[in-house]
Amino acid sequence: MSLRLLCIVLCLFGVQPAVAGETTLPTVDPSFDVAVTTGLVYGVGEVQAPIPGLKDLLLDLYEPTAAGAHGELLPALVIIHGGGFFGGSRQQEHLVQIANEMATRGYVVVSIDYRLVPDEPVPSPRVEPILQAMIDGQGGTPTANGVAAVAAIDDGLTALDWLREAAGSLGVDPARIGILGGSAGAITSVHMAYVLDNYGVPAPALSFVVDLWGGSLIPPDDPAAAAAHLEAGEPPLFVIHGIEDRSVPVELSELLVARALEQGVVHEYHPIEGAGHGFGSIDLFNREVTPGVTLFDRVLIWSREVLMSSPMFVDSFESGDTSAWSSTSPLAVARHASVEKRVTASRNGSPPGAIGIYTLTR
Protein backbone atom coordinates (compact mmCIF):
# COMPACT_ATOMS: atom_id res chain seq x y z
CA MET A 1 0.00 0.00 0.00
CA SER A 2 1.40 3.40 -0.93
CA LEU A 3 1.46 6.23 1.59
CA ARG A 4 -1.05 8.09 -0.61
CA LEU A 5 -3.45 5.15 -0.56
CA LEU A 6 -2.89 4.77 3.17
CA CYS A 7 -3.98 8.36 3.71
CA ILE A 8 -7.14 7.72 1.71
CA VAL A 9 -7.90 4.66 3.84
CA LEU A 10 -7.28 6.62 7.03
CA CYS A 11 -9.74 9.27 5.93
CA LEU A 12 -12.38 6.55 5.64
CA PHE A 13 -11.88 5.90 9.34
CA GLY A 14 -12.49 9.52 10.21
CA VAL A 15 -8.84 10.61 10.27
CA GLN A 16 -8.06 13.67 8.19
CA PRO A 17 -4.35 13.77 7.43
CA ALA A 18 -3.38 16.43 4.93
CA VAL A 19 -1.70 15.35 1.71
CA ALA A 20 1.21 16.47 -0.41
CA GLY A 21 0.53 19.55 -2.47
CA GLU A 22 -1.04 21.56 0.33
CA THR A 23 0.72 24.73 1.33
CA THR A 24 1.30 23.53 4.88
CA LEU A 25 4.41 21.41 5.25
CA PRO A 26 5.61 18.72 5.79
CA THR A 27 4.22 16.50 3.04
CA VAL A 28 3.53 12.76 3.12
CA ASP A 29 5.31 11.82 -0.08
CA PRO A 30 8.80 12.93 -1.23
CA SER A 31 8.24 16.37 -2.74
CA PHE A 32 11.58 18.21 -2.78
CA ASP A 33 15.18 17.88 -3.79
CA VAL A 34 17.65 18.25 -0.94
CA ALA A 35 20.72 20.47 -0.59
CA VAL A 36 23.25 19.26 1.98
CA THR A 37 25.85 21.41 3.71
CA THR A 38 28.33 19.46 5.85
CA GLY A 39 30.55 20.41 8.75
CA LEU A 40 28.87 23.59 9.96
CA VAL A 41 30.03 24.75 13.39
CA TYR A 42 27.04 25.15 15.69
CA GLY A 43 28.95 25.90 18.87
CA VAL A 44 31.90 24.91 21.03
CA GLY A 45 32.25 22.67 24.05
CA GLU A 46 34.98 22.39 26.67
CA VAL A 47 37.12 19.23 26.59
CA GLN A 48 40.16 17.89 28.42
CA ALA A 49 41.45 15.59 25.66
CA PRO A 50 43.54 15.35 23.62
CA ILE A 51 44.46 18.72 25.13
CA PRO A 52 42.37 21.04 27.33
CA GLY A 53 40.44 23.61 25.36
CA LEU A 54 37.32 24.21 23.31
CA LYS A 55 36.17 21.80 20.61
CA ASP A 56 34.12 22.86 17.60
CA LEU A 57 30.75 21.13 17.49
CA LEU A 58 29.69 20.20 13.96
CA LEU A 59 26.41 19.53 12.20
CA ASP A 60 25.23 18.66 8.72
CA LEU A 61 22.34 20.70 7.31
CA TYR A 62 19.73 19.19 4.97
CA GLU A 63 17.51 21.76 3.25
CA PRO A 64 14.51 20.97 1.02
CA THR A 65 15.02 23.08 -2.07
CA ALA A 66 12.00 25.06 -3.28
CA ALA A 67 10.11 24.29 -0.07
CA GLY A 68 8.42 27.34 1.36
CA ALA A 69 8.14 28.90 -2.08
CA HIS A 70 4.74 30.31 -1.13
CA GLY A 71 5.98 31.82 2.10
CA GLU A 72 5.44 28.80 4.35
CA LEU A 73 7.72 28.46 7.33
CA LEU A 74 9.27 25.02 7.39
CA PRO A 75 9.29 22.48 10.21
CA ALA A 76 12.70 21.33 11.44
CA LEU A 77 14.18 18.16 12.87
CA VAL A 78 17.31 17.68 14.98
CA ILE A 79 18.93 14.23 14.72
CA ILE A 80 21.24 12.93 17.47
CA HIS A 81 23.32 9.83 16.76
CA GLY A 82 23.96 6.86 19.02
CA GLY A 83 27.16 5.11 20.04
CA GLY A 84 27.02 4.66 23.80
CA PHE A 85 28.37 8.20 24.33
CA PHE A 86 31.74 6.75 23.33
CA GLY A 87 31.51 6.73 19.52
CA GLY A 88 29.18 7.26 16.60
CA SER A 89 28.79 10.06 14.10
CA ARG A 90 26.26 12.32 12.44
CA GLN A 91 27.31 10.76 9.13
CA GLN A 92 26.25 7.20 9.92
CA GLU A 93 24.51 5.73 6.90
CA HIS A 94 21.09 5.21 8.49
CA LEU A 95 21.06 8.76 9.89
CA VAL A 96 21.95 10.22 6.50
CA GLN A 97 19.06 8.25 5.00
CA ILE A 98 16.62 9.49 7.65
CA ALA A 99 17.83 13.07 7.23
CA ASN A 100 17.43 12.97 3.45
CA GLU A 101 14.00 11.34 3.59
CA MET A 102 12.70 13.86 6.11
CA ALA A 103 14.10 16.75 4.08
CA THR A 104 12.36 15.52 0.93
CA ARG A 105 9.10 16.01 2.85
CA GLY A 106 9.86 19.64 3.67
CA TYR A 107 11.76 19.41 6.95
CA VAL A 108 14.94 21.39 7.50
CA VAL A 109 17.12 18.76 9.16
CA VAL A 110 20.27 19.18 11.24
CA SER A 111 22.22 16.08 12.23
CA ILE A 112 24.76 16.77 14.96
CA ASP A 113 27.95 15.45 16.46
CA TYR A 114 28.54 16.05 20.16
CA ARG A 115 31.29 15.54 22.74
CA LEU A 116 32.06 11.93 23.62
CA VAL A 117 33.91 10.01 26.33
CA PRO A 118 37.30 10.20 24.52
CA ASP A 119 37.01 14.02 24.54
CA GLU A 120 36.78 14.03 28.33
CA PRO A 121 34.05 16.66 28.07
CA VAL A 122 33.35 19.31 30.68
CA PRO A 123 29.61 20.09 30.73
CA SER A 124 28.75 23.77 30.95
CA PRO A 125 27.29 25.35 34.11
CA ARG A 126 23.76 25.42 32.65
CA VAL A 127 23.48 21.62 33.01
CA GLU A 128 25.17 21.41 36.43
CA PRO A 129 21.95 20.27 38.16
CA ILE A 130 21.62 17.36 35.72
CA LEU A 131 25.28 16.45 36.17
CA GLN A 132 24.85 16.42 39.94
CA ALA A 133 21.76 14.21 39.66
CA MET A 134 23.72 11.81 37.47
CA ILE A 135 26.61 11.74 39.96
CA ASP A 136 24.30 11.24 42.93
CA GLY A 137 22.63 8.30 41.19
CA GLN A 138 26.04 6.75 40.56
CA GLY A 139 26.94 6.68 44.24
CA GLY A 140 28.67 10.05 44.28
CA THR A 141 31.44 9.08 41.87
CA PRO A 142 31.00 10.37 38.30
CA THR A 143 31.64 7.89 35.53
CA ALA A 144 33.08 8.89 32.16
CA ASN A 145 29.88 7.76 30.40
CA GLY A 146 27.69 9.66 32.85
CA VAL A 147 29.60 12.90 32.32
CA ALA A 148 29.56 12.39 28.55
CA ALA A 149 25.79 11.80 28.65
CA VAL A 150 25.30 15.15 30.34
CA ALA A 151 27.66 16.81 27.87
CA ALA A 152 25.53 15.38 25.04
CA ILE A 153 22.46 17.05 26.57
CA ASP A 154 24.45 20.27 26.82
CA ASP A 155 25.45 20.07 23.16
CA GLY A 156 21.92 19.17 22.08
CA LEU A 157 20.70 22.37 23.72
CA THR A 158 23.43 24.30 21.91
CA ALA A 159 22.27 22.80 18.60
CA LEU A 160 18.70 23.90 19.29
CA ASP A 161 19.95 27.38 20.15
CA TRP A 162 21.83 27.48 16.84
CA LEU A 163 18.78 26.31 14.90
CA ARG A 164 16.49 28.87 16.47
CA GLU A 165 18.99 31.66 15.85
CA ALA A 166 19.27 30.58 12.22
CA ALA A 167 15.52 30.05 11.82
CA GLY A 168 14.96 33.30 9.94
CA SER A 169 17.62 32.62 7.31
CA LEU A 170 16.59 28.98 6.96
CA GLY A 171 12.88 29.71 6.74
CA VAL A 172 12.22 27.54 9.81
CA ASP A 173 9.20 27.87 12.07
CA PRO A 174 10.81 27.91 15.55
CA ALA A 175 7.54 26.62 17.02
CA ARG A 176 7.69 23.42 14.94
CA ILE A 177 10.94 21.68 15.81
CA GLY A 178 11.13 17.98 16.53
CA ILE A 179 13.99 15.83 17.74
CA LEU A 180 15.00 12.27 16.80
CA GLY A 181 17.65 10.15 18.44
CA GLY A 182 18.88 6.59 18.33
CA SER A 183 20.25 4.77 21.40
CA ALA A 184 22.49 7.30 23.20
CA GLY A 185 20.95 9.96 20.97
CA ALA A 186 17.47 8.86 22.04
CA ILE A 187 18.51 8.98 25.70
CA THR A 188 19.80 12.50 25.07
CA SER A 189 16.55 13.50 23.35
CA VAL A 190 14.37 12.12 26.16
CA HIS A 191 16.33 14.04 28.78
CA MET A 192 16.16 17.26 26.80
CA ALA A 193 12.40 16.99 26.38
CA TYR A 194 11.21 15.55 29.69
CA VAL A 195 13.88 15.68 32.40
CA LEU A 196 15.62 19.07 32.41
CA ASP A 197 12.78 21.07 33.89
CA ASN A 198 12.57 18.71 36.87
CA TYR A 199 16.05 19.87 37.88
CA GLY A 200 15.59 23.57 37.32
CA VAL A 201 17.10 23.61 33.83
CA PRO A 202 14.82 25.31 31.25
CA ALA A 203 13.52 22.70 28.82
CA PRO A 204 13.54 23.57 25.12
CA ALA A 205 10.21 23.92 23.34
CA LEU A 206 9.86 20.83 21.14
CA SER A 207 7.00 19.70 18.92
CA PHE A 208 7.71 15.98 19.23
CA VAL A 209 10.33 13.40 20.20
CA VAL A 210 11.20 10.25 18.22
CA ASP A 211 12.91 7.86 20.64
CA LEU A 212 14.62 4.92 18.92
CA TRP A 213 15.58 2.35 21.57
CA GLY A 214 16.39 4.85 24.32
CA GLY A 215 14.84 5.91 27.61
CA SER A 216 15.38 8.02 30.72
CA LEU A 217 18.44 7.35 32.89
CA ILE A 218 18.32 10.06 35.56
CA PRO A 219 18.33 9.05 38.33
CA PRO A 220 20.36 6.06 37.07
CA ASP A 221 19.58 3.99 40.17
CA ASP A 222 15.77 4.29 39.82
CA PRO A 223 14.34 3.66 36.31
CA ALA A 224 10.74 4.22 37.43
CA ALA A 225 11.60 7.61 38.93
CA ALA A 226 13.54 8.46 35.76
CA ALA A 227 10.48 7.78 33.58
CA ALA A 228 8.25 9.74 35.98
CA HIS A 229 9.88 12.99 34.87
CA LEU A 230 7.59 12.91 31.81
CA GLU A 231 4.54 15.02 32.63
CA ALA A 232 1.24 16.13 31.11
CA GLY A 233 1.60 18.86 28.51
CA GLU A 234 5.09 17.80 27.42
CA PRO A 235 5.97 16.95 23.80
CA PRO A 236 4.35 14.02 21.99
CA LEU A 237 6.47 10.86 22.00
CA PHE A 238 7.11 8.19 19.37
CA VAL A 239 8.98 5.09 20.60
CA ILE A 240 10.47 2.07 18.84
CA HIS A 241 12.33 -0.56 20.87
CA GLY A 242 13.43 -4.16 20.34
CA ILE A 243 12.05 -6.47 23.01
CA GLU A 244 15.29 -8.47 23.06
CA ASP A 245 17.50 -5.39 23.44
CA ARG A 246 20.47 -6.22 25.66
CA SER A 247 22.16 -2.80 25.42
CA VAL A 248 19.33 -0.51 26.46
CA PRO A 249 16.65 -2.59 28.22
CA VAL A 250 13.18 -2.37 26.69
CA GLU A 251 11.87 -1.83 30.21
CA LEU A 252 13.05 1.79 29.94
CA SER A 253 10.69 2.34 27.04
CA GLU A 254 7.89 0.44 28.73
CA LEU A 255 8.17 2.68 31.79
CA LEU A 256 8.27 5.82 29.65
CA VAL A 257 5.26 4.77 27.58
CA ALA A 258 3.29 3.79 30.69
CA ARG A 259 4.04 7.22 32.11
CA ALA A 260 2.94 8.92 28.87
CA LEU A 261 -0.32 6.97 29.02
CA GLU A 262 -0.86 7.93 32.64
CA GLN A 263 -0.16 11.59 31.96
CA GLY A 264 -2.19 11.81 28.76
CA VAL A 265 0.78 12.65 26.56
CA VAL A 266 0.28 11.87 22.88
CA HIS A 267 2.41 8.87 21.99
CA GLU A 268 2.87 5.89 19.72
CA TYR A 269 4.82 2.80 20.74
CA HIS A 270 6.22 -0.05 18.65
CA PRO A 271 7.78 -2.85 20.74
CA ILE A 272 9.47 -5.10 18.18
CA GLU A 273 9.30 -8.79 18.97
CA GLY A 274 12.52 -10.74 18.43
CA ALA A 275 14.57 -7.60 17.77
CA GLY A 276 17.67 -6.49 19.60
CA HIS A 277 19.39 -3.12 19.71
CA GLY A 278 19.97 -0.60 16.99
CA PHE A 279 19.40 -0.11 13.29
CA GLY A 280 21.12 -3.40 12.53
CA SER A 281 18.32 -5.22 14.32
CA ILE A 282 15.44 -2.89 13.44
CA ASP A 283 15.40 -1.72 9.82
CA LEU A 284 13.02 1.23 9.88
CA PHE A 285 12.74 1.34 6.11
CA ASN A 286 11.81 -2.30 5.54
CA ARG A 287 10.17 -3.61 8.70
CA GLU A 288 6.43 -3.28 8.27
CA VAL A 289 3.83 -2.35 10.86
CA THR A 290 1.03 -3.39 8.53
CA PRO A 291 1.41 -4.60 4.94
CA GLY A 292 2.98 -1.84 2.90
CA VAL A 293 3.46 0.49 5.88
CA THR A 294 6.96 0.55 7.37
CA LEU A 295 8.11 1.86 10.71
CA PHE A 296 9.58 4.86 8.94
CA ASP A 297 6.25 5.48 7.22
CA ARG A 298 4.70 5.62 10.68
CA VAL A 299 7.32 8.13 11.85
CA LEU A 300 6.49 10.30 8.84
CA ILE A 301 2.73 10.11 9.18
CA TRP A 302 2.64 10.43 12.96
CA SER A 303 5.03 13.38 13.13
CA ARG A 304 3.11 15.18 10.41
CA GLU A 305 -0.17 14.61 12.23
CA VAL A 306 1.34 15.93 15.44
CA LEU A 307 2.56 19.06 13.69
CA MET A 308 -0.85 19.53 12.10
CA SER A 309 -2.58 18.97 15.46
CA SER A 310 -4.41 15.87 14.26
CA PRO A 311 -2.60 12.79 15.59
CA MET A 312 -3.99 9.38 14.75
CA PHE A 313 -6.98 8.52 16.90
CA VAL A 314 -6.10 4.88 17.49
CA ASP A 315 -5.02 3.48 20.83
CA SER A 316 -4.12 -0.01 19.74
CA PHE A 317 -4.60 -2.49 16.96
CA GLU A 318 -3.38 -5.89 15.92
CA SER A 319 -1.17 -5.91 12.83
CA GLY A 320 -3.38 -5.70 9.77
CA ASP A 321 -6.54 -4.68 11.67
CA THR A 322 -7.14 -0.95 11.35
CA SER A 323 -10.76 -1.27 12.47
CA ALA A 324 -9.96 -2.16 16.09
CA TRP A 325 -10.56 1.18 17.76
CA SER A 326 -10.20 1.54 21.51
CA SER A 327 -9.63 4.29 24.02
CA THR A 328 -7.55 3.67 27.12
CA SER A 329 -7.20 7.29 28.19
CA PRO A 330 -9.91 9.96 28.26
CA LEU A 331 -7.46 12.80 27.94
CA ALA A 332 -4.95 13.54 25.21
CA VAL A 333 -2.72 16.49 24.60
CA ALA A 334 -1.82 17.87 21.17
CA ARG A 335 0.38 20.79 20.29
CA HIS A 336 0.11 23.14 17.36
CA ALA A 337 2.78 25.83 17.37
CA SER A 338 2.97 26.98 20.98
CA VAL A 339 -0.69 26.29 21.77
CA GLU A 340 -1.74 23.33 23.91
CA LYS A 341 -5.12 21.72 23.34
CA ARG A 342 -6.69 19.27 25.76
CA VAL A 343 -9.37 17.08 24.28
CA THR A 344 -11.61 14.29 25.46
CA ALA A 345 -11.19 11.08 23.50
CA SER A 346 -14.25 9.89 21.63
CA ARG A 347 -14.58 6.55 19.89
CA ASN A 348 -16.63 8.06 17.08
CA GLY A 349 -14.74 11.31 16.70
CA SER A 350 -11.45 12.54 15.31
CA PRO A 351 -10.09 14.89 17.98
CA PRO A 352 -6.85 16.80 17.41
CA GLY A 353 -5.01 14.61 19.89
CA ALA A 354 -4.99 11.00 20.96
CA ILE A 355 -2.86 8.31 22.49
CA GLY A 356 -1.64 5.76 19.98
CA ILE A 357 0.03 2.46 20.74
CA TYR A 358 0.87 0.18 17.85
CA THR A 359 2.23 -3.31 18.45
CA LEU A 360 4.18 -5.09 15.73
CA THR A 361 3.28 -8.74 16.02
CA ARG A 362 5.03 -10.13 12.96
Image (cartoon, rainbow, N blue to C red):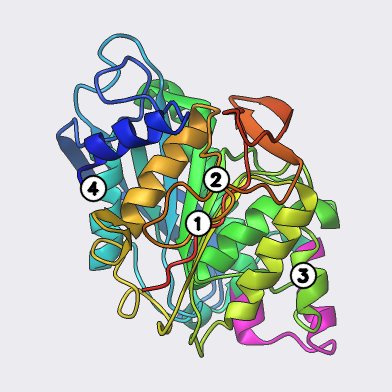
- Residue drawn 44% across and 34% down? 13
- Point out the tag, 3 or 2, that comes first from the N-terminus: 3
Q: Tell me the residue that label 3 is attached to.
A: 226
| Closer-to-camera residue (238/82) | 238
- Residue drawn 75% across and 60% down? 259
Percent coordinates x, y for residue 189 in the rendering = 57, 58
Assign a secondary structure to mark 1: loop
Q: Give the amino acid type for the residue marked by disc 4 in the picture.
A: Asn
Assign a secondary structure to mark 3: helix
Cα separation between marks 3 and 4 = 33 Å
Q: Tell me the residue that label 2 is attached to.
A: 314
Mark nearest the camera among 4 and 2 is 2
Cα separation between marks 4 and 2 = 29 Å
Q: In the figure, is residue 82 to the left or right of 36?
A: right
Q: Tell me the residue that label 1 is attached to.
A: 317
Q: Would you call the spot at circle 3 few (<14 residues within 10 Å), some (14-19), or many (20 or more)?
A: many
Residue 136 counted in the magenta span: yes
| Closer-to-camera residue (233/154) | 233
Q: Tell me the residue that label 4 is attached to.
A: 100
Q: Which residues are magenta?
A: 129-148
Q: Are marks 2 and 1 in contact (CB under 8 Å)?
A: yes
How many dots with numbers? 4
- Residue drawn 68% across and 65% down? 256
Q: In the figure, is residue 285 to the left or right of 210?
A: left
Specify the farthest residue to the top.
70
- Point out the tag, 4 or 2, that comes first from the N-terminus: 4
Within the image, what quadrant is residue 151 found in?
A: bottom right
Q: Give the amino acid type for the residue marked by disc 1 in the picture.
A: Phe
Q: Would you call the spot at circle 2 few (<14 residues within 10 Å), some (14-19), or many (20 or more)?
A: many
